[in-house]
Amino acid sequence: MHDYAVYFITLALGVAVFYAFNTISAQATFVQGDVGEMLKAVGDILQGVTFFLAVVMGFLMVYANNFLLRRRKKELGLYQVLGMRRGQVARILTLETLVVALVSLAAGVLLGFLLSQLLLFVTGSLFKVAIRDFHFFFSLDALGVTAGCFAVTFVVMMVFNGITLRRVRLIDLMGARRRGETNRLRSLPLSVALFAVGVALVGVAYARLLHHGLPGATNGTSQATFNVTTIMMMAGTVLLFFGLAGTAVAFLTRTKRLYWRDLHAFTTRQFAARVNSGSLSMAMISLILFLAITSVTAGMSICSAINEAAEKNVAYDASVAIFPAEGTGTPDGVSQALAGTGVDLDAIGSHATVTLYDASDLADGAGMSMNAVMQATGQELPSGFSADNYATAMGLSDFNALRALKGLSPIELGEHQYLVTSSMANVSERYSKALAKGYSFTIGGTRYTPALDHAVTDSSAVVQNSTIASNPGIYVLPDDVVASCPLYQTVIDFEYAHGIAEGDRGIRALADALDGAKVANMTGTATETYSEGSSTTGVVSYLALYIGFVLVVACAAILAIQQLSSAEDSSPAYQTLSELGCPTRLVYGSLRTQTVLAFVLPLVVGLAHSACALAVVVPLVETFGFVNLASSSVMAATIFVVVYGGYLLLTYRTEHAMVHAALERRRHAL
């Protein structure tokens, strides 16, 4: 039971999570409307991700199986000494693996069944729908996907077992327990040098990432630049762990009062041997933990931004955007196209028509572009914006019509004045700083100055319904000034005169009529926009939690297996300490310290990598909405405390039992 504890728990958790997340499609029967169809689409996405994660779990199970085989080599060798053929030994292992697989599959499906019931209500919360006619449900499709993935994994494990038994010599099996850790790097000066180089590479990679940002999101940052930064971070992490053992020994041996106290010298050497033999795998684990932490935190941050943005940016009952094409290239052309549809806009409800113009060439030079404003006022472009010279403008009458629709008082412009509106928090802050400094530009020889010392950020800054903040800065100028600019698009925003259902029908009729007249358009009712936002947050949340959970389980299980293997190999050393009269509490204290450090060090490095990455990702997400990083961090922390901490506790308890058994055997022998 001790041999298979980590193996069994990892399998059961994997089965439970795979089953629960693959029941998303089955949950569609408990909700009404379009959300059911969304859940089916989300289920298809998660099913595809399941096969990818099954490969990850498959490698983990093969790794775990190799550990179990290594622990039992002497036993397997003894069977062959007693006359068993290798085929018979292989059949024993196959049957044992099959029994554990079936038991863990049953336990995992039972746990997943309970988890899926809870997940149904999480789905209802994410998609903001009521769960109707709830009853316990079981998904045969989810069971089939889960069982299929793990069946392939177990076949691969059985094949590996057979190959291992055929290749290994009997003397190797009988002497397996006498082999200790392999010390790959014995030179302390070289270890310290590698550690220093690793830390330096990671530090430079952090600086490069913070300076250059992400490709496509930061101006001037190419994919090649980002790739170099990534390679430096990965290489630095590997070198850091390669040199960590020797550096720790070199440092602690110079602090003699600490080094020679209790069993610190023994603990240092033992832990150094553990790190030295598993340095590459610990480096890889820290990188995978970095990916898991970042994916969960960033995913939850995106959901937070979308949810917050939807509250502010779904400002109307409906929005209809009409794009210029032949016959609708002017405001008059748009009016004629609308008149040709035969739809009475007043019957749908009160409305405001806003015409947006391409003002890139309106001002002398590039004076109206965000890039020009930021450069002139000594500010950096917000994350995700490129240094182009694009600018958008609207007429004052359209802007005040939009404000009237929202019940806001009009704003008047003085002679040669302008306004800026924006619904993006970090963009509006930059524009407000520029306006407070009196930023001005020239149009046709006339200097235009700001009418306000801040950007307009109230509901009139939302030009059309959107799941994210979509106004990166629109200029408001006198009507006659913008009339000569090329038409960008026309937006009609509605507040329904009657109920939502009747209003939505009217908007669908308008969209069908525009399609029939071959007028390019895009409609966004509040109902549809909220539903779209809920769908996006649902997909992102499930993917973040699903991927993050499986990766954390994989890392924790690999660490657990490594530490159990090291504890097994070190049992003779603990026996010797006991024979020399060392108190048992010091023996177990040394074991506990080694285990905690083995789990904590990769986590600390992974957290450092994630903190640097999130420092770049979060500002980019904040462009489109407020990010509640605290709640995102709490979600990630909960997963790690429950899963990672649970594996740490299980590993120590199993190691404790191993060492205790070894000490008891020695006492009985004496």
Image (spheres, helix red, strand yellow):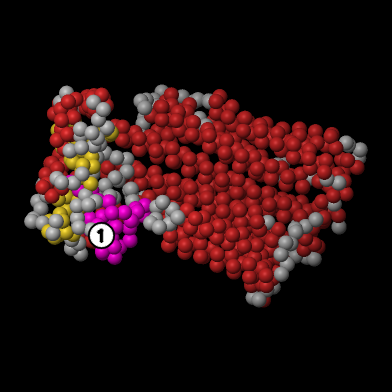
Q: Residue at x 36, y 27 (%)?
A: 34
x and y percent of residue 501 in the render?
24, 25
Can the viewer see residue 623 in this picture?
yes
Which region is colored magenta? 366-394
**The one of 480 and 621 positioned closer to us in this rendering:** 480
Determine if the magenta segment contains residue 382: yes
The quarter of the picture where the C terminus appears is bottom right
Q: Nearer the viewer, residue 409 or 52?
A: 52
The residue beneath circle 1 is: 373
Judged from the image, the secondary structure of the residue bearing numbered disc 1 is helix
Q: Measured along the vertical axis of the image, is residue 19 above or below residue 187?
A: above
Query: Looking at the image, can residue 494 be seen?
Result: no
Please state which of residues 220 and 374 is positioned toward the viewer in this rendering.
220
**Residue 433: image location, x then y, percent:** 24, 61
Q: Residue at x 59, y 65 (%)?
A: 198
- Say which of 139 and 424 sits in front: 424
Prevailing SS of the magenta stretch:
loop
Q: Position of residue 153 (x, y in %)?
A: 66, 36
Q: Amino acid at mark 1?
A: Val
* Residue 351 against residue 167 in the figure, above or below: above
